[in-house]
Amino acid sequence: MTTLTIRFNGVQEQILDRMVKTGVAQTKSEAIRMALLAFASQMRLLDDKAITAFLRAELSKNPRSPEEILSALETAKNEGITR
């Protein structure tokens, strides 16, 4: 396991706050892990099986219904980020 101390400000800080506020992620650390997975997927650095395994493990820690997840994602999309 790797532990990092990273300072975020500006739009990156707003994104993390919004991900937690809207329920997309439970914590800022979880939001960062999710964003890293999304980036790895887009860049084809990680296959879908690995991403699915991670998401299942995360959801088993804090179960949420598919409706709750979709609702949180929709809320995050609709609220947007302001600079």
Image: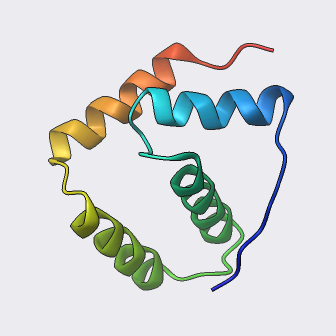
Q: Pinpoint residue 35: horizontal percent, then vertical percent.
A: 62, 55
* Residue at (66% x, 76% y) in the render: 44
Q: Pinpoint residue 66: horizontal percent, then vertical percent.
A: 18, 47
Give the position of the N terminus as an image quadrant.
bottom right
Q: Nearer the viewer, residue 42 or 22?
A: 22
Colouring mode (rainbow / by chain / secondary structure / one colour): rainbow
**Up/down of 24 relative to 61, above or below:** above
**Up/down of 50 relative to 14, above or below:** below
Image quadrant of residue 2?
Answer: bottom right
* Residue at (82% x, 55% y) in the render: 6
Q: Pinpoint residue 59: horizontal percent, then vertical percent.
A: 27, 63
**Up/down of 15 relative to 50, above or below:** above
Q: Nearer the viewer, residue 17 or 71?
A: 17
Give the position of the C terminus as an image quadrant.
top right
Q: Count of labels shown?
A: 0
Q: Nearer the viewer, residue 77 or 55?
A: 55
Question: Left or right: 4 with respect to 45?
Answer: right
Question: Left or right: 13 with respect to 72?
Answer: right
* Residue at (77% x, 68% y) in the render: 4
**Up/down of 67 relative to 22, above or below:** below
Q: Pinpoint residue 25: horizontal percent, then vertical percent.
A: 44, 45
Image quadrant of residue 63?
Answer: bottom left
* Residue at (58% x, 55% y) in the render: 29
